Image: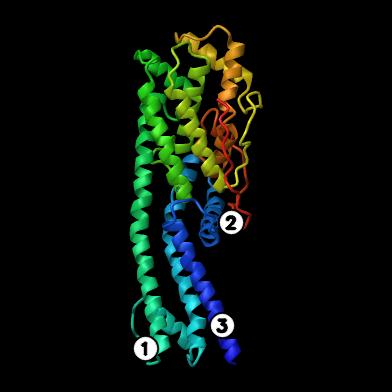
Amino acid sequence: MVAVRLLAFAAGFAFAMATVLSAVRTVVVPRGERVRITGAVLALTRWLFELRAARVATFAHKDRILARLAPISLILLPGVWAVGILLGFVPMYWALGSDSWRDAVELSGSSLLTLGFERTDDLPTVVLSFVEALLGLGLVALLISYLPTIYGHFSRRQAQVAKLESRAGSPPTPMAMLIRAHSIGQLDNLHATWTEWEDWFIALGESHASFPALCFFRSPQLDLSWIVSAGAVLDTASFTLSTVDVEASFRAPLTIRAGYLALRRIADFFDVEYDPSPRLDDPISIHRAEFDALCEDLRSAGLPLKHDLDQAWRDFVGWRVNYDAALRGLCGVVMPPVAPWSSDRAIDWGRSLPVFRRVRHPSAAADQA
């Protein structure tokens, strides 16, 4: 009987510590780690919301449903952690001499929630109840710090996305961004724009790789999305460098590099496949006919384009190949509104999120520019 109680204590301790580590790795550790409990909650919530969203006819209705996915997942997480700690301490109380499993459950719940309606005079059990009470208070503190951090990152991300609407339309497109820059005489003076978006991509890679749930926070505006905005800016920078006949800005290549590095870091968490060292002539999802059509529209709007469009196409492919697969894969994960050259050709990775699959270690991103 002693051996059984020791085994029960060890099993309960392991389960409780796994739950605590899940909370710490999700909230405290400043990197995107694959945590099974956290991933399972997010995957299950996403699956349920997708089942509901699949039954509606319009994207507007679907977007309203999916907008609740991430907030509800974040609210559920502390509850799951609390239940995990409660269940983990039950066999430990039983191993220390509780009269029954029911008494152990009541003592665990009373200690975790600091209710105090169950007490014991046994010193080891008292110490254990103090430890559980501290863990319960720690979960509350994590929640208090976690939510403001998440919404702070979300607010900063959306400020730049909303700003892009006035420059590139809704949903944003490279054509609209280039034509509007040309119409106000700023086509050859986009240095500040590239600097802003380089900083945005750097912050995006840090925040969304550390807190992957941020990827599922949707924009307040129906036609806007962080991933669609990222694609529009990267395509605009790539098209400017390859095709528009203006003085090249050294900021544009840096923005593209910051962009594809950020998208790849986020893609690693979701097991989105991409080639970390693509060749300059690897195929991309944009067809030459689409490229030529955009060139014709821009030329009709009065933009100066390079004469050798064949070389311009090869240069554009050389830039786009760095982020094409990661961009389309993340569009399949996030399910944003339809936008040209990004979510209109999203890669469908299925309904599951990586929870129990192997952890894919981020690959070194090679710069092909």
Instruction: Tell me whether the residue at label 2 lies in contact with that at label 3, contact meaning CB atoms closer than 8 angstroms.
Output: no
Q: Earlier in the sequence, mark 2 or mark 3?
A: 3
Q: Looking at this view, is 69 or 325 the one in front? A: 325
Q: Residue at x 45, y 16 (%)?
A: 248
Q: Few, some or many C-alpha atoms within 10 Å of disc 3 (few <14, some 14-19, many ≥20)?
A: many
Q: Earlier in the sequence, mark 1 or mark 2?
A: 1
Mark 3–mark 1 Cα distance, whole angstroms, equals 21 Å
Instruction: Answer whether residue 66 is visible to the viewer in this image.
Output: no
Q: Secondary structure at mark 2?
A: loop
Residue type at numbered disc 1? Arg
Q: Few, some or many C-alpha atoms within 10 Å of disc 1 (few <14, some 14-19, many ≥20)?
A: few
Residue type at numbered disc 3? Ala
Mark number displayed over residue 119:
1
Q: Which of the 4 image quarters holds residue 275?
A: top right
Mark 1–mark 2 Cα distance, whole angstroms, equals 39 Å
How far across and down, in percent of the image, does residue 279 sit? Answer: 65, 27
Mark 2–mark 3 Cα distance, whole angstroms, equals 27 Å
- Image quadrant where one finds the N terminus: bottom right
Q: Secondary structure at mark 1?
A: loop
Q: Earlier in the sequence, mark 3 or mark 1?
A: 3
